[in-house]
Image: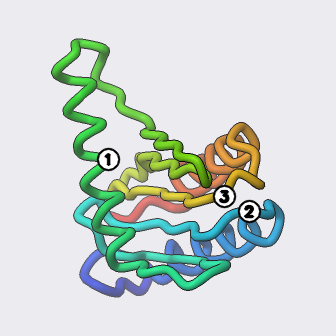
Amino acid sequence: MMSIDGNISSLVRNVSGRLLNRLVANISGIKAALISTVDGFEIAAECAESSDIAKLSAVSSTLSAIGNMAMLETDMGTQYRSVTIENDNGFLVIMDIQYKSYPMIFCVVASREAMLSRVIHQAKIIIDVIANKLPKLE
């Protein structure tokens, strides 16, 4: 399997891109959806509006790390899963993807038009496909 950017395979990039494209097409109100490395670099992204994906990737990485540390510091377990931030205009959801070859971060930015529960449900399906259905790289 061909590897690009050191570790990210072309298969992971292509599948991730197609899954994000379908998510944005099927749920109105999603402004951006992206999958990035844990250190904040874009793997795949879909934007319905103009977004700075590089900044969003970096912020997602930071918020995921903060969420993970909050779980550890509050003795609520070691299996961090997600962070959700809501405001008057919508919400941001960040979830970890425990892909065996290299962990990743999933992020969705949506307006109030999108239903939070539907976005989370679809995000979990995407995460399952990437984490459990793609071949593991050695």
What kind of element bears circle 2?
Answer: loop
Query: Which residue is the extreme one toward the front?
Result: 88
Q: Where residue 3 sits in the image (x, y, percent)?
A: 36, 83
What kind of element bears circle 1?
Answer: helix
Looking at the image, can residue 82 be seen?
A: yes
Quadrant the C terminus occupies:
bottom left
Label 2 Cα neighbours within 10 Å, binned few <14 / some 14-19 / many ≥20 = some
Residue 8 against residue 59 in the figure, above or below: below
Q: Which mark is residue 111?
A: 3
Q: Which mark is residue 64?
A: 1
Q: Nearer the viewer, mark 2 or mark 1?
A: 2
| Left or right: 125 as drawn, with respect to 74 | right
The disc, 2 or 1, on the residue closer to the chain's N-terminal end is 2
Q: Which mark is residue 29?
A: 2
Q: Where residue 32 sits in the image (x, y, percent)?
A: 58, 70
Label 3 Cα neighbours within 10 Å, binned few <14 / some 14-19 / many ≥20 = some
Q: Amino acid at mark 1?
A: Ser
Q: Where residue 15 sits in the image (x, y, percent)?
A: 61, 73
Residue 76 against residue 118 in the figure, above or below: above
Which is nearer the eye, 87 or 79?
Answer: 87
